[in-house]
Image: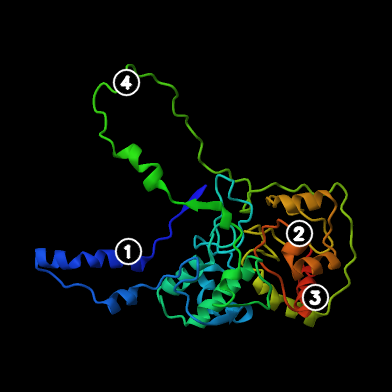
Amino acid sequence: MSKSRNLSIGAALAAIMAASPLMAEKLGLGRPALPEEIAAWDLDVRPDGTGLPAGSGDVLTGEEIFAEKCAACHGDFAEGVDNWPKLAGGFDTLDRDDPVKTVGSFWPYLSTTWDYVNRSMPFGNAQSLSTDEVYAIVAYILYSNDLVDEDFTLSDENFLDVEMPNAGGFIVDDRADAEHAAFSAEPCMQDCKDSVEITMRAAVLDVTPQEASDGQDDSATAEPAAETQVVQVAAADPALIADGKKAFKKCAACHQVGDGAKNKTGPLLNGVVGAAAGAAEGFRYSKALAEAAGDGLVWGEAELTEFLTKPRAFLKGTKMSFAGFRKQSDIDAVIAYLGSFPK
């Protein structure tokens, strides 16, 4: 279990600066920090809301700001780009050897998110965001983790109402009381044991990853249904397909279609409309998708419509970080676009 440390940077600086007069006198260097100088550094927000400024920001505004100032590193849907951190997803992975630690899966306090965004982001231009912009970005990150609805507005007034999924996964850091005594005694340096025995030996571990697939989801591989149900898809309007190509840009970070398409973070989607779920060769699907495929899920237009509206509501446990399209017209267009690519 993880341990939390809730230390105010301002309090730490205050303690250091309290000793500065003695150091200045002893070394003949510097001067004590003024209270206003300490206050300028004391920007942290505590789990109980201490230090939180007045302000508010809604999800939709946060999406726009996030796309402009954060998506280059963290992806349009907070799914992470290359080695930059994922901010969404990772649910039910903390018991694995390689947990995906995101705002939704790991961080116990929303104050940590607000404080970090306010203090350190955007990368290379820290503290350039207004208070309301920080609220809006944090609201969008919550939405990307399916913790709030799209009409949600985060403010200093409802900040403490947001419950983080892993709030109970941390305990107070009590090492000073529980462990310090055991390591503060005089160490034994000679004849500490009557005899020394080898009780076990290190094992040679094969740490080279297997290149079984290009997909990054490390859960179960779905086997295609024994009999693929054929769903007839009507010929789509070329204008609708063109609209779908534009809307698909929100999907292109994880999925590919067309000639040369291959599995990326998500499976390739050639021939997906009307096909059995979990049918992309070589892609390792989530356990939830694998089970749905085993139950005979077929990606007909109705199923795709429901899935693209709100993926996590349609398929609980899906690893797809995209929160869903807000406009039915975009969903219709994307389905038409996907239907234009045969398997």
* Residue at numbered disc 4: 193
Which residue is located at x 75 percent, y 73 percent?
334
C-alpha separation, residue under disc 2 versus residue under disc 3:
19 Å
**Residue 123 appears in view:** no
Sequence order check, earlier mark of 4 and 2: 4
Sequence order check, earlier mark of 1 and 3: 1
**SS at circle 2:** loop
Mark 4 belongs to which amino acid?
Answer: Lys
Which sits in the foreground, 154 or 138? 154
Q: In which quadrant of the rendered view does residue 150 lie?
A: bottom right
* Residue at numbered disc 2: 315
C-alpha separation, residue under disc 3 versus residue under disc 4:
74 Å
Mark 2 belongs to which amino acid?
Answer: Leu
Sequence order check, earlier mark of 3 and 4: 4
Label disc, if present, on residue 12 of the rendered structure: 1
Does 106 appear above or below 46?
A: above
Q: Nearer the viewer, mark 2 or mark 3?
A: 2
Crowd around label 1: few <14 · some 14–19 · many ≥20 (10 Å): few
Q: Nearer the viewer, mark 4 or mark 2?
A: 4
Sequence order check, earlier mark of 2 and 3: 2
* Residue at numbered disc 3: 332
**SS at circle 4:** loop
Does 161 appear above or below 188?
A: below
Q: Nearer the viewer, mark 3 or mark 4?
A: 4
